[in-house]
Image (tube, grey):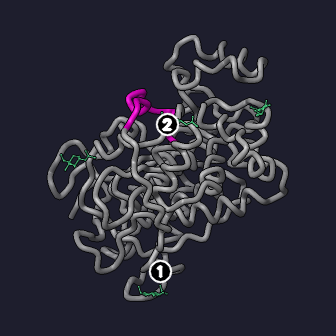
Amino acid sequence: MASNNKLVVLVVTLLLAFLGTVASQPQQKGPYVCFNGWLRLPTLNPQLCRPRPTIQPRRIRPPGQGLSYGYYNNNGSFCPSAERIIRDAVAKAVTANPGMAPGSFVSSSTTASSGYGCDGSVLLTTTASRNSDVEREGPPNKNSLRGFEVIDAAKSAIEKACPGIVSCADVVAFAARDASSVLSNGRINIKMPGGRLDGRESFANETDQLPGPFSNLTQLQSSFSNQGLTSDEMVTLSGAHTIGRGRCAFFSNRFGDMDPAFAAKLRAQCSNTNNFVNQDDVTPNVLDKQYYRNVIDKKVLFNSDAVLNSTETIAQVRQNANGATTWERKFEQAMENMGKIGVKTRGAQGAEIRKVCSRVN
Ligand SMILES: *[C@@H]1O[C@H](CO)[C@@H](O)[C@H](O)[C@H]1NC(C)=O
Ligand SMILES: *[C@@H]1O[C@H](CO)[C@@H](O)[C@H](O)[C@H]1NC(C)=O
Ligand SMILES: *[C@@H]1O[C@H](CO)[C@@H](O)[C@H](O)[C@H]1NC(C)=O
Ligand SMILES: *[C@@H]1O[C@H](CO)[C@@H](O)[C@H](O)[C@H]1NC(C)=O
């Protein structure tokens, strides 16, 4: 059981790392909400759940300029084996942990928080400013980013094949795509462009500004809107709560609002508020649309899940729960869009291709 949990954490970390890397718009300064962080939050630190200042909506669509499909097959950035090496590293991490749910992988890569956008800043332990309070050490990420081992393994294999060509930010984005495919048993296939560069800064305080398990609908919508993502995309990406685990402290105030049998089961698992339980009690390790059925059945953990039963969002919840492949297609598109947030591309100031993902060159 313990090693099973460990595997789940690893997989989840990979997916989270990706979501974490998609936080900010490039030219703007200030705290940015990180989706990785958001999806991963409930499993993390209570500090993240304190009230935070409201962020002014920016409503800028992530443009993704400078990104392209098959980027490393062409264009002076020639490393045609890069995507295969990453796919193999993700697959290997799953098979090397027999009994590890493939779901934990994706979930991991979707949950790491980043305040600096899709620039790999979440991976840094040593930055240009030499500060010690990097994002990786921030409350949501500290000790929780074991999926980064997979990123590091892929990156060092790539450096052997083609040194100095492939960014850590792209390794994370491709690994999130591959983990999503593994965890969905091949039903989710994201088209992920490449061409991101790595940033040189990372601050733990930038992970503070995340929507959390106690967020209401307005807060969720404005957090996503600040990143240029729509309310529909917020509902779509919430489906990642179909894998991973949540900490009892973040939902034990709402047993009374849940399906009674579900609440009774959770109460038994939550003798200690630091315990973790599966987010999706039905198919805990598969990236699937079960989450939306759970919203309708009152079998979700967090307030931020339950609020999707509102007049503005319930039609989409029903559509996702009932459509044969509706959600999978929307999730693919939303993940691709998320991968365009806050990217640094060729010509960006203060950007580079890191040699080692945990430190600036
Ligand atoms: C985080 O800390 C850095 C360095 O101390 C500072 O420059 C930055 O403004 C801070 N960010 C926030 C959101 O407080
Ligand atoms: C090459 O880079 C240019 C400019 O960044 C971009 O428009 C083009 O789509 C890229 N082509 C490939 C195959 O990546
Ligand atoms: C959501 O929370 C914010 C901040 O606590 C509050 O101002 C707002 O009224 C809430 N919205 C709803 C619909 O409950
Ligand atoms: C959803 O909201 C409606 C209207 O407020 C309510 O009747 C229903 O019980 C709610 N369902 C869930 C799953 O929360």
Q: Quadrant of residue 169?
A: bottom left
What main secondary structure does the magenta stretch of the protein show?
helix
* Residue that badge 2 annotates: 212
Q: Residue at left 53%, top 25%?
A: 250
In the picture provided, is 252 more to the left or to the right than 31? right
- Asked if residue 109 shows in the view, the reply is no
Q: Residue at left 75%, top 47%?
A: 317
Marker disc for residue 50: none
Is disc 2 surrounded by few (<14), some (14 to 19) or many (20+) residues within 10 Å? Answer: many
Give the spatial CA distance, label 2 vs label 1: 35 Å
The residues colored magenta run: 39-52
Quarter that holds the N terminus: top right
Badge nearest the viewer, 2 or 1: 2
Q: Secondary structure at mark 2?
A: loop
Q: Are marks 2 and 1 in contact (CB under 8 Å)?
A: no
Quarter that holds the C terminus: bottom left
Q: Secondary structure at mark 1?
A: loop
Dot 1 beta carbon under 8 Å from ligand 2: yes
Question: Is 51 inside the magenta-drawn segment?
Answer: yes
Measuring from the top left, give residue 291's x and y in whole percent. Answer: 72, 41
- Asked if residue 50 shows in the view, the reply is yes
**Which of these two is toward me, 7 or 173?**
173
Dot 2 beta carbon under 8 Å from ligand 3: no
Q: Residue at left 47%, top 73%?
A: 63
Marker disc for residue 71: 1
**Which of these two is toward me, 66 or 165?**
66
Q: Label 1 sits on what residue type? A: Tyr
